[in-house]
Image: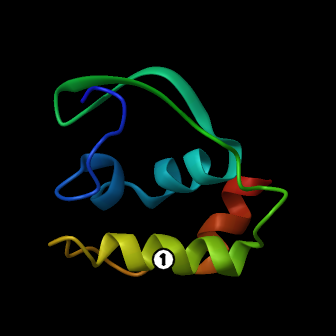
Amino acid sequence: AGSFPPLANSDYVTGDPKRLAAILINGIQGDFTVNGQVYNSQMPAWKDNYNDEEIAAVMTYVRNSFGNKAAPVDKAIVEAVRK
């Protein structure tokens, strides 16, 4: 508890896809707030392990799983964030 934020009904998952792309590309660590609850964790960067199309596919899957209903993510969004 308090380490790993939820994927279900998460404002990070279903909100602005650029924010989620930035986390997947660059990673995140330390305190951050999801749905009003503070988490302290580390997500490693994927930029060197996955291409833009693969990251967009993972984002699309998560944004439409776990009860989430959000628009698919085009790889152009990931490309823009990576730059």
User: Furthest-right residue in view?
Assistant: 48
Residue 9 versus residue 61 in the image, above or below = above
Residue 81 versus residue 2 in the image, above or below = below
Q: Residue at x 45, y 60 (%)?
A: 17
Q: Is residue 11 left or right of residue 81?
A: left
Residue type (three-letter) at the residue carrying disc 1: Val
Q: Nearer the viewer, residue 17 or 44?
A: 44
Residue 34 versus residue 65 in the image, above or below = above
Colour mode of the rendering: rainbow
Q: Residue at x 62, y 70 (%)?
A: 55
Q: Nearer the viewer, residue 41 or 53?
A: 41
How far across and how far down the image is residue 8, in percent?
Answer: 20, 59
How far across and how far down the image is residue 9, in percent?
Answer: 16, 56
| Residue at image mark 1 | 73
How many numbered callouts?
1
Q: Quadrant of the N terminus?
A: top left
Residue 69 placement: quadrant: bottom left
Q: Is residue 25 left or right of residue 39?
A: right
Q: Say few, some or many: other residues with alpha carbon within 10 Å of mark 1 (under 14 / 14 to 19 / 20 or more).
A: many
Q: Is residue 2 left or right of residue 60?
A: left
Residue 51 placement: quadrant: bottom right
Q: Is residue 71 left or right of residue 68?
A: right
Q: Quadrant of the C terminus?
A: bottom right
Q: Residue at x 56, y 56 (%)?
A: 21
Q: Nearer the viewer, residue 72 or 27?
A: 27
Q: Residue at x 33, y 71 (%)?
A: 63
How far across and how far down the image is residue 59, in percent?
Answer: 47, 70
How far across and how far down the image is residue 68, in percent?
Answer: 20, 70
Check disc 1 and report its element: helix, strand or loop.
loop
